[in-house]
Image (cartoon, rainbow, N blue to C red):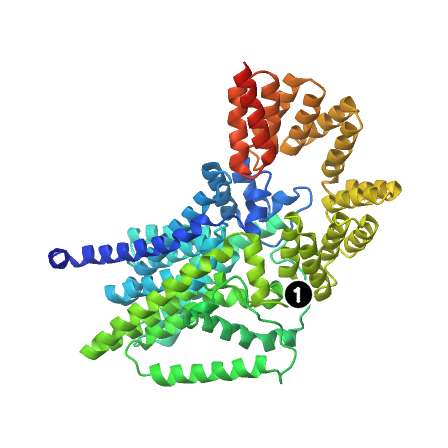
Amino acid sequence: MNRLTVLISRLPRSARDRLALAAVMASTAIIYLRSLRNGFVYDDVDLVLNNRYIGQWSFLWRAFTGDEYWFVDPFHVPHTDRYRPLLLDWLGLHYQLFGVNPLGWHASMVALHLIVVALVFKVAMRLTSRSGVSLLAAAIFALMPMQAEAIEWVDGSVALAAAFELAAFALFIGGETSGKRSIGRLAISMACYAGALLCHETAATFPALIGCYVLVFADRRENPVDRIRDAIRRAAPFAAVVVAYLIGRRLVLGFVTLPGAANRSSFAQRVMTIPWIIATYLELPVMPWLAGPAHRVLFVTSLLAPEFYLPAAALIAIGGALVFGLGSHPDRRLFLFCALWSAITISMVMYLPALLPNQLVHDNYTYLPSVGYCIALADWAAGIANASALGRRGVAIGTAAILTLFAAFLWRVQPVWHDDLALFSHCIAVFPESAACHGELGTRLEAAADYRGAERELSRAVALEPHDGMFLYDLGVVHARMGDAARGASEAAEGLNRLSEPSPAPYVGLAHLYLAAGQPEQAAAALKVAESLPGGDIEAGLDRARASAKDGDLAGAASSLHRLAENHPDDYRLWTALGEVLDGDHRTEEALAADQRALGLSPPDAEPYLAAAHALRGLGHHDEALELCRTALEIAPDDQRARTLMSEIQADTQVR
């Protein structure tokens, strides 16, 4: 150990810094190894597993032509006000690399986090020129438990945008202010910033961050008017990127911001709630055990509520203490900029009308804002350490204790994102008033055939949010599965009536509930409603064709599916259904051709692989059929049909 210490001490300072940063990154990677056991949760399921276009290479450029969820229903867009094409490309490329194996996706997110950690070190170095401060800032950022949410969700939007934004900022502050090299550096910085905007819209505040940097660190001898003019001039190129982005949003989505609000709060309630939100965000770095996917923050309805006056008083006290304590500090400009960094980068998520009532506070919203906090804390600790030997000893012990505590809580919180049952159970324990969490848990319990549990959670969701018709619809489905089809159909119909913009799939489901309740006329009416909605010709056509096939009219089913598939050639479900019908009609070669069309679309679904395997078995191509069964099991490891088909094919091979 002594020899190693001597060898390290003889290295150049830059090499020692790189070695120390590598140690920080390696430790972070080891602690995040636990996340590799997690699956896809919440939004990941829709973005990856339920995304029937993600396996097509055309998905990469179609991402620029619609909102984040355009693939849910390409005939009825936009679905959201989120324009994140680079995020969708990130997902599409990951699907090409890893399919639906979550291990590769999570490993990639850990690698992305390590890149961001290195960028935090780079930015801190350029702000402070002190490697010790920069290493400590990077270590604190790397191990903060509240960073886990941004890394555990594989969609990567927040972390990806942060990487682009930090790279843009490091490039901006790291070079000359004039000359050809400066122009090239600025161009690359602007390109990185454009990448951040195309990953997450909260990056729109970056020009303000640039302007504040120029103002805060400008020569104090310079005229204030000149400083402001210089700040505007240097922020202008990035403001131009924002303008171009907004124009692109307008052209693609048809609007800059989506009209309406995501909640029913009043302006006064939003204002009164802001202190509680800010106080909660300030608690997260100093109370690491609070890290997780949910925080109980509700809209405040009265000035006399303790949720208003206690956080407001605490914020005033903290602000006064900081001004008094740091007003004469030699690094006060750095502290001021770090405070502005955190405030500016989190400001977009303080627009409360755009937030769902159960998501006013999210850990991942702090991912980039926490960089300012980490740099300020590291610089403050370095100041104490430099003051005396006792200070150095205290800072060393305190740093080791804090980082160990962070690592322990980070390790503990990662299993919360193991699956949706774990995720939403945790959310309800922390935030029992969240209707969305009860509803989400209810649908997961229904999928797991725990109908009593699903009924309990969905009933609670309906009671908390009676205006959300999908909760009542899902409750109706559960009651139908519990044997009360008439009640289920009635509740599902009432739920759909409460929706302002219904989609066709629930109406197809309602038709099935009516049939189970012995009401064929109502079922036919529901199917007609489904067919009248955008994209409903596919949903209703699939359902009718399957019904025809079940009734023995295989030729009629094949004919209608073939017409649908020709009209919608990118929808693998149609080709898969056509292949199954043709196979059932003993038209095996035609079935295989349809199945191959489905497989050519690289669907994130085991069904087409099983259909093709069945057709190949009929043609005697056992090895190819087995390979497709294995692929189906990679997509759906618990699919008993794939295991059964594999056993049958292997038995055929042994007989042969």
Where does the N terminus fall, quadrant-wise? bottom left
Q: Position of residue 505 (x, y in %)?
A: 72, 44
Q: Find residue 372 and report its horizontal and vertical position in percent.
A: 38, 67
36 vs 105, nearest the viewer: 36
Left or right, 98 with reference to 130: right
When the figure is inspected, residue 229 is found, relative to residue 441, above or below; the finding is below
Position of 321 with respect to 511 (left or right) is left
Work out whether residue 171 can be spotted: no
Q: How many marks?
A: 1
Please name the residue shown 68% across and 62% down the image: 260
Disc 1 marks which amino acid? Asn
Q: Nearer the viewer, residue 319 or 458?
A: 458
Looking at the image, can residue 174 be seen?
yes
Of residues 329 and 604, the one nearer the viewer is 604
Q: Secondary structure at mark 1?
A: loop
What x and y, as percent, mark residue 509?
A: 75, 44
Q: Is residue 561 left or right of residue 248?
A: right
Is 170 situated above or below 87? below
Q: Position of residue 12 (x, y in %)?
A: 15, 56
Instruction: Name the residue furthest top.
Output: 656
Q: Quadrant of residue 323?
A: bottom left
Question: Quadrant where the C terminus lies?
Answer: top right
Q: Which residue is mark 1?
A: 263
Give the residue drawn at x 68%, y 17%: 587
The 10 Å Cα crowd at callout 1, few under 14, some 14 to 19, many 20 or more, is some
Residue 635 falls left or right of residue 469: left
